[in-house]
Amino acid sequence: QLQLVESGGGLVQPGGSLRLSCAASGFTLGYYAIGWFRQAPGKEREGVSCINSGGGSTIYADAVKGRFTISRDNVKNTVYLQMNSLKPEDTGVYYCAAAPGFSSKVMWREATYNYWGQGTQVTVSS
């Protein structure tokens, strides 16, 4: 069964850090670009960051530039999202998704992605 599983979410105070993981089972993650998306309560899902299959190209949403870092370990079949200086507006369910290609023009489109995880909750609150 092909699936992506996110982990690492939780409750953190403003200014804190979390590292999310996206692990693949049933397929080789290294063949895919990976995107992280998030959905806040009452809002549409939005793109946060993405990385190409080799890890050499990354894209970040303006809201997270300089605070979040996406990386991958293809040996471990896992992609990470390091989130620092977290703000209350970062609260939401975070999803990872796998796409067969990488292009900066389409990586924010959900239709680009073939596989999605179930999400992990991130809550930033004092």
Image (cartoon, grey):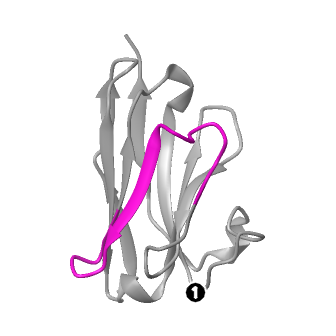
Vertical position of residue 17 compared to residue 80: above or below: above
Which residue corresponds to the image point at 36% horizontal and 89% vertical from the top-left? 27
42 or 13, which is in the foreground?
Answer: 13
Outermost residue, right side: 105
Quarter of the rendering containing residue 86: top left
Determine which residue is flagged by label 1: 100
Q: Position of residue 97 (x, y in %)?
A: 51, 68
- The C terminus appears in which quarter of the rendering? top left
Local packing at callout 1 (Cα closer than 10 Å; few below 14, some 14-19, many 20+) is some
Mark yes or no: residue 9 visible.
no
78 or 65, which is in the foreground?
Answer: 65
> On the rendered structure, is 6 left or right of 94?
left
Vertical position of residue 71 compared to residue 15: above or below: below
Mark yes or no: residue 85 visible.
yes
Which residues, given as a range, are shown in magenta?
59-79
Vertical position of residue 115 compared to residue 49: above or below: below
Type of the residue with mark 1: Pro
The magenta stretch spans residue 29? no
Q: Position of residue 79 (x, y in %)?
A: 36, 66
- The N terminus appears in which quarter of the rendering? bottom left
> On the rendered structure, is 115 left or right of 7?
right
The magenta stretch spans residue 68? yes
Quarter of the rendering containing residue 35: bottom right
> On the rendered structure, is 91 left or right of 8?
right
